[in-house]
Every structure is written in structure tokens, then in C-alpha cells.
Amino acid sequence: MDEPLTILVAARDEEQVIAGTIASLRRSFPDAEVIVADDGSRDRTADAAERVGAIVLRLPRRGKGQALSAAERAAPPGRLLLCDADLSGDLTPLANGDGDLVVAAFAERVGGGFGIAKRVARDLIDLLGGVRTREPLSGQRSLSPSARAACFPLAAGFGCEVRMTIDAARSQLEIRELELPLRHRVTRRDVGGFVHRARQLRDVVYACGPQAVNYRGLRLPLVGWKVGLAGGPAAAAISALGLADDLWSGPERGFLGHLRSGRTTGVLKLLGIPAVGFLATRRLSGALLVGLGANAVNQLDTRPGRALKAYLVAAAVVDAPLGIAVLLLPYDLREMAMLGDAGSNALGGLLGLNSVKRFAGRGRWVAIGALAGLTLLGERTSIGAWIERTPTVSWLDRLGRA
């Protein structure tokens, strides 16, 4: 193959084995660049990899998918070879294999659990991608430039390989599995092994659900629908409208942009969310508070943790539920998940619903006026830019962010 090859290795706390893995890769592929994405290791993994000639990206801990995506952005154009940090064996046949996405299947299975995560992953790939696989979780993969373009950025965490296969299948690329005599560290049937496989199963399920790319180019699972599940029927309906916007929205932004475009998911929210508020409260003020509240929180959901922090402050005033927001905040701040419109709209809707309970008639209309003013301000200027250039507000906004 004429295209240049770059080898990507995601590693966390692999000081004991990473040097041997990199040395073997450099012997097999002397002309390839090896990039190690150190995913927040607590040991000297990065130093060990650098000593044997790898380029090392020292990253905060965010998970395998995000580590590999960061390494891919640092790689030159061309083919990619992905490799686990604890691998032993020759990957030359994999790199030279025919196909856009070539996946290594281990010739011999050693250790592991009961195969639940693998069966779920295999079934999800079959359901969503129409491809039957033997090794859906294998981290040893060769990608052509076409597969690279179709699959990156990867899904977060341990679900990255499963979503990679689905994305390649949906792009009608050629997918092959190649059996090779490879070995890696055994995960046993003990507490640590079962915890690892439980995380793997969770990440696989999230990777096959709604996804979005955030402002830094990271691909994250959209988990805002959990607000709808926890917030009651009205919040669930608002979350469903937001999820439709997450999945099928176009380039339109703001009220005016959606109104000019006509039939968009934004117009669906513009009409549907106040309707939910009216049905839930039987009041015009309720419809306006729910609709404007949903839009206000959505306007703030442009940086990790920003919308959830604003919600928690407002929730303390109107006595709105705190639990689900507290649970989601660490994942949002660390860029491990995103609210999306499903979450931000539902949170704003909860604020509106509880404002109806908390305030009397005059108080409600004061709140409506304030929210309407915020909406108009967001149409004319960037609220996020104002937050970032105001020192105290900016510090609070960045607090806790990874």
C-alpha cells in the first residue's frame, strides 16, 4: 500500500507493558509513526512510551474513544492502525489486509467473562449496521483513509470499536475480519474484571444511541433524555421534542432562522413545548414560562456544565428537582456526555413548570419578561461570549471543567 501509515495506541496505566508493545510495533513497521494517547495515566506510561520512540499525547482521563480521537487529529493523512497497549503479536497481516476496515480476530480466546458484552455488541452491530461480526470489541484495526473519514471522531469510551464498525457499514465500506495469533492481558472473572466489562457494556449501549460532536470536536453520547425520564410526563414530552431536534435538526439557529426555514424541528419545538406547558398548567403564563425557560437553558448549553450550573441556581429559587442535574453534572463537566436539546429543553421546562407553582400572577409575568428579554438578547448577540469576557462569571463558568 502506498498511503503512509500511522499507528495509534490508547493507553492508561500501562507502564509495565507499553515499551514492549511499542518496540514490537516499530520493528514491524519501521516507517510508521507511532502515537500514544496517554489517557490520564497515574503511572509513568507516557515516559516509558517516549523512551522507545513513540510520540506521546498526555491527556486528561476521558476514555479510550476520546484518547484515540485526539491521536487521530494529531496524525498525518493516510492509513491508520489501531492497537491496544497490552498487545503481543504481529499486526503486519492486519495492516496489509484488503478492505477499508480490517479487524483482528484472536485465534485463541484466553480469559474473559461470560461473553455478555460481546453478544450485545455483536447484536447491536447486526441491528444497526447489518453486519455479522466475530470480534466486535477487538481494538486491533486497520483503517483506510475512507474508513478514517467515516469513523472519526470515535464514540466515547469502550464503545468506540462497536460504533466504528456501524459507521463503516453505514458508509458502505468493505469490512473484513482477519484471524491472527495475538495475545493481550487477560481479564479474569474477578471483581475488577466484572467492573471492567460492566463499563464496557454501558459504553457500548451509549455508543449505539444518540451522539453529537461538541465544540472541541469530541463525539459524545447524548444523555439528556434521562432528564425526561426523571422529570415526569411533561418533562418527558419536552425531552422527546428536544431529542427530535438533536437527531434531525438542520443548520438553522434562533427563532428567526427556524421561522424563515418553515418546517424544521426548531419550529416543532417552538410550537410543541409551549403546548406541553399549557396542557400541564392550564394557563397561558405556564405555556410562556415553559417555552421561554426551555429556550433559555438551551441557549446556555454551549460549554460543558454551563446549562446545568445555571439550572441548579434557578432550581434553588423555584424549588425544581435537583437530583438528575447533580448526577449529570460531573459527566458533562468532564466531557464524557452531553445534554443536547433533549436535556437542556427538559431542564428549562422543569424550571417553567415549577415557576408556575412558586410565583403568583404578577411574579410569573415578571419572570416571563426576564426570560423574553434573555431570548431577545440571545437573538442579537452571543450570551456565551459575554460570559467568557466577564471575569467573575467566567471563573464560575469554568469551575470544575476538565
Image (cartoon, grey):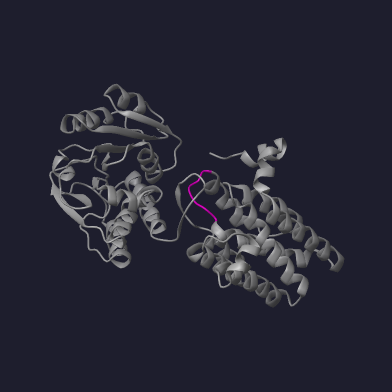
Residue at the spot 75% in from the left edge and 59% down from the top edge: 371
Chief SS of the magenta region = loop
Would residue 71 be found to the left or right of residue 216 on screen? left
Position above or below: 131 against 61? below
Would residue 259 be found to the left or right of residue 1 on screen? right
- For residue 10, which quarter of the picture? top left
Would residue 187 be found to the left or right of residue 241 on screen? left
Query: Residue 294 placed where, x, y %?
Result: 66, 62
- For residue 165, which quarter of the picture? bottom left
Residue at the spot 65% in from the left edge and 46% down from the top edge: 384
Query: Residue 387 placed where, x, y %?
Result: 68, 43
Where does the magenta region start and end?
Answer: 334-339
Residue in front for this viewpoint, 307 or 255: 255
Query: Quick check: can you spot residue 177?
Result: yes
Quadrant where the N terminus is found in the figure: top left
The residue lying furthest to the front in this view is: 260
The residue lying furthest to the right in this view is: 362
Position above or below: 155 against 235? above
Residue in front for this viewpoint, 131 or 315: 131
